[in-house]
Image (cartoon, rainbow, N blue to C red):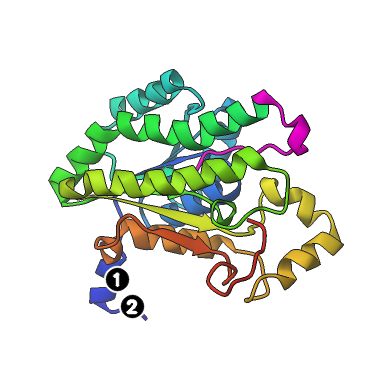
Amino acid sequence: MDTPATATMFDVSGRRVLVTGGTRGIGYMIAAGFALAGANVVVSSRKPAAVEKAAEQLSEHGSVTGIVGDVSSPASARDLAAEILRTGSELDVLVNNAGVTWGAPLEDFPDAGWDKVMHTNLEGVFHLTVALLPGLRHSAEQSGRATVINIGSTDGINVPEMDSFSYGASKAGLHHLTRHLAKKLASESITVNAIAPGPFESRMMKFVMDDPVALDRVRSAIPLGRLGRPDDIAGLSIFLASAAGQYLTGTIIPLDGGGVGCGASARG
């Protein structure tokens, strides 16, 4: 049972949290975790129907609203930020989770596949974070801290097995951007960290989940012998957003069952 001290240390109740790409996959897991922990969660996605459905489902866990938004261009990222700040001047936690992938053989890799992934996974994080700085700064001034959590990937650390050239490059870039932003914003009590998930049950992993042989191969490469679960990603996110994680910034944390730390190479 939590003591009063540890309960306070990990408390995120009442904090305003934005999770981009929060209508499915890892983003949905993170949003559900924050809602259960008492945070006021906003999920965003490009598709109105997905936003409405996810917000309705997640509201069963706590306070959750949805906003339609796209981070794949500077203008649309700024529009999303403006809507977030219009509905509340403070933003305690920004989870940059929205992302896409693309796979194609090296010689056939299309320009569109490179540009779409880079615009969303890397540039979108930069433009949205910058546009939301007024809200993050306001929260830091009021409570002493604000938090940015970027969702990277072990594909940005290890060389991926798949021909997803733009995806791995975008996540490696995001990891470095995380460090740069962390250094720049540290003096303002805004921490910036990245979580680099390995394999989790999500739409991005569907091609593996549907293939028993591939799924066994992925599991066998994970020292802990299993895929990531919702509590794994939600728990780490809550830690980074709570008082327990306030002395941590500029870190890239692999969340992959030991793959990176133990020298394995399971695909994330």
Q: Are marks 2 and 1 in contact (CB under 8 Å)?
A: yes
Which residue shows up at 84% across the image and 56% down it? Answer: 211
Q: Tag 1: residue type?
A: Ala
Viewer-proximal residue, 176 or 132? 176
Q: Give me the residue at 48% from left, 28% from top.
A: 71
Query: Considering depth in this image, is 116 or 215 the residue closer to the camera?
Result: 116
Q: Is residue 195 above or below residue 94?
A: below
Neighbour class for label 2 at 10 Å: few (<14), some, many (≥20)?
few
Q: Of the residues shown, which amino acid type is indicated by label 2?
A: Asp
Q: Quadrant of residue 24?
A: top right
* Residue tagged 2: 2
User: Please, which residue is most extreme toward the front here?
Assistant: 107
Report whether residue 22 is seen.
no
Q: Magenta region: which residues?
A: 97-111
**Residue drawn at (72%, 39%), measured in percent from left and top?**
103
**Is residue 76 shown above or below 262?**
above
Left or right placement of residue 64 versus residue 148 in this view: right
Q: Is residue 149 above or below residue 104?
A: below
Query: Callout 1: helix, strand or loop?
Result: helix
Q: Is residue 110 magenta?
A: yes
In the image, 63 versus 230, the foreground residue is 230
Q: Quadrant of the N terminus?
A: bottom left
Q: Which residue is mark 1?
A: 7
In x, y percent, where is residue 99?
Answer: 56, 39
Q: Position of residue 142 (x, y in %)?
A: 14, 45
Q: x%, y% of residue 138?
A: 18, 38
The picture quadrant where one finds residue 212 is bottom right
- What mark, if any, has residue 138 been given in the picture? none
Q: Quadrant of residue 42?
A: top left
Task: Mark yes or no: residue 227 visible.
Answer: yes
Q: Residue furthest top?
A: 75
Residue at 81 percent across and 60 percent down: it is: 214
